[in-house]
Image: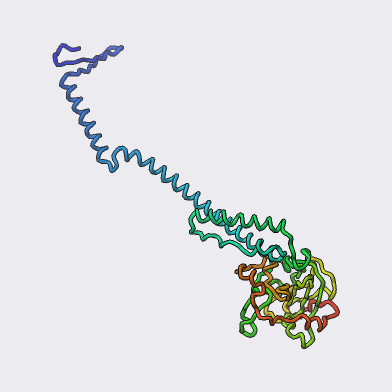
């Protein structure tokens, strides 16, 4: 401590190796100045914090808000992904239910099990509660139909092994270009009833029996009274029993004979371009007992790989109320068929 009354304390440094010493003297006046300077700094700091947009609290809260926004964004993304998955499952569930209803119709399950379906899946913009509600309502419907098909007595018109439910061509190499119903004829330009489906495929692709049966007709038509059949070119007709028939037209070659027993999946011939067709294609028709009369029905009711736009209407009217102007079978059977299987013609060099 110094001797000056204004001196509060004095600090001295004496080097160990000698030399001049140093000292720091703190007086009352210096202390007052230091305290005033410290107070000014504190006031300025508080002022700076006070003029911030949200103050110190807002400045610190900004980090918390950003974190919550990131978490909310992640939750929204996860919710959107879950909704997409739910909608995809709804579409798959609906497709399975529609196929199961067609199967129930074809195998003769009680109408109560397949007549009623459910509404189409919700649109992508539907709310979560709507999607969940649809799944909760439609899921048990499919479970109930599956249980009914497994337990209820089935009364198909023909034996299950004969049911023409298999695809007649390789579905990975064919495209349905014209379905059962009304269409515009590419030859006359007029609207006409089509009692089967046209399946575009590669020339020479195998045509297979969709179910076991017996060949009623194989070959091409040459008699005038069966002229309505000539538009199908080379054709095969199978009898599956119980009034169920299948017709295959525009074949390039025919590899079966009349009265021959056919197994499911057996080759009948190959896709061709005979008769009334502009491209290689297979005409596929299913005739089914409806109201005690065998008539063409929508093949999609039995062949489940074919698309069906309005199943509710088709189940009520399998023949779609088309006119009964389809080619009569007695005319075809009375005309006879080629005795030898029809072989594919060799094309000339010019045609190749």
Q: Is residue 197 above or below residue 334?
A: above
Q: Of 114 and 308, which appears nearest the observer? A: 114
Q: Is residue 313 visible?
A: yes
Q: Is residue 119 above or below residue 241?
A: above
Query: What residue is shown at x 58% (from left), y 55% (from top)?
Result: 89
Q: In which quadrant is the N terminus drawn?
A: top left
Q: How is the image coloured?
A: rainbow
Residue 258: x and y in percent read 84, 76
Q: Of 191 and 239, which appears nearest the observer? A: 239
Q: In which quadrant is the C terminus drawn?
A: bottom right
Query: What residue is shown at x 38% (from left), y 43% (from top)?
Result: 65
Q: Residue furthest left?
A: 5
- Numbered label tally: 0
Q: Is residue 176 above or below residue 79?
A: below
The answer to whether 46 appears left or right of 202 in the picture is left
Residue 170: x and y in percent read 72, 66
Quadrant of res 209? bottom right
Residue 184: x and y in percent read 61, 80
The answer to whether 27 appears left or right of 237 in the picture is left
Quadrant of res 107? bottom right
The answer to whether 315 appears left or right of 334 in the picture is left
Q: Is residue 20 visible?
A: no
Q: Is residue 284 above or below residue 350?
A: above
Quadrant of res 277? bottom right
């Amino acid at each position: 401590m110094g001797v000056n009354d204004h001196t509060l304390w004095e600090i001295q440094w004496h080097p160990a190796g000698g030399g001049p010493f140093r000292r720091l003297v703190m007086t009352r006046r210096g202390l007052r100045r230091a305290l005033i300077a410290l107070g000014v700094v504190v006031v300025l700091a508080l002022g700076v914090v006070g003029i911030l947009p949200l103050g110190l609290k807002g400045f610190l809260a900004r980090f918390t808000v950003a974190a919550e926004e990131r978490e909310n964004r992640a939750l929204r993304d996860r919710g959107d992904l879950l909704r997409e998955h739910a909608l995809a499952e709804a579409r798959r569930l609906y497709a399975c239910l529609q196929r199961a209803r067609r199967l129930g119709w074809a195998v003769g399950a009680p109408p109560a099990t397949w007549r009623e379906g459910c509404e189409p899946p919700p649109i992508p913009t539907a709310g979560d509660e709507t999607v969940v509600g649809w799944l909760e309502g439609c899921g048990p419907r499919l479970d109930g139909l599956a249980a009914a098909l497994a337990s209820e007595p089935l009364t198909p018109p023909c034996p299950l092994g004969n049911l023409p439910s298999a695809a007649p061509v390789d579905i990975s190499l064919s495209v349905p270009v014209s379905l059962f119903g009304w269409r515009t004829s590419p030859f006359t330009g007029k609207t006409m009833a089509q009692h089967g489906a046209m399946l575009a495929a590669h020339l020479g692709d195998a045509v297979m029996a969709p179910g076991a049966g017996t060949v009623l007709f194989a070959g091409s038509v040459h008699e005038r009274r069966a002229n309505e059949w000539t538009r199908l070119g080379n054709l095969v007709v199978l009898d599956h029993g119980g009034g169920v028939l299948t017709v295959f037209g525009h074949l390039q070659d025919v590899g079966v004979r009349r009265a021959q027993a056919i197994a499911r999946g057996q080759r009948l011939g190959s896709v061709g371009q005979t008769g009334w067709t502009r491209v290689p294609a297979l005409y596929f028709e299913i005739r089914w007992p409806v109201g005690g009369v065998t008539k063409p029905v929508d093949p999609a009711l039995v062949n489940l790989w074919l698309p069906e736009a309005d199943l509710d209407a088709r189940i009520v009217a399998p023949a779609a109320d088309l006119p009964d102007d389809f080619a009569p079978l007695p005319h075809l059977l009375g005309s006879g068929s080629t005795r030898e299987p029809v072989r594919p013609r060799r094309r000339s060099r010019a045609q190749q």
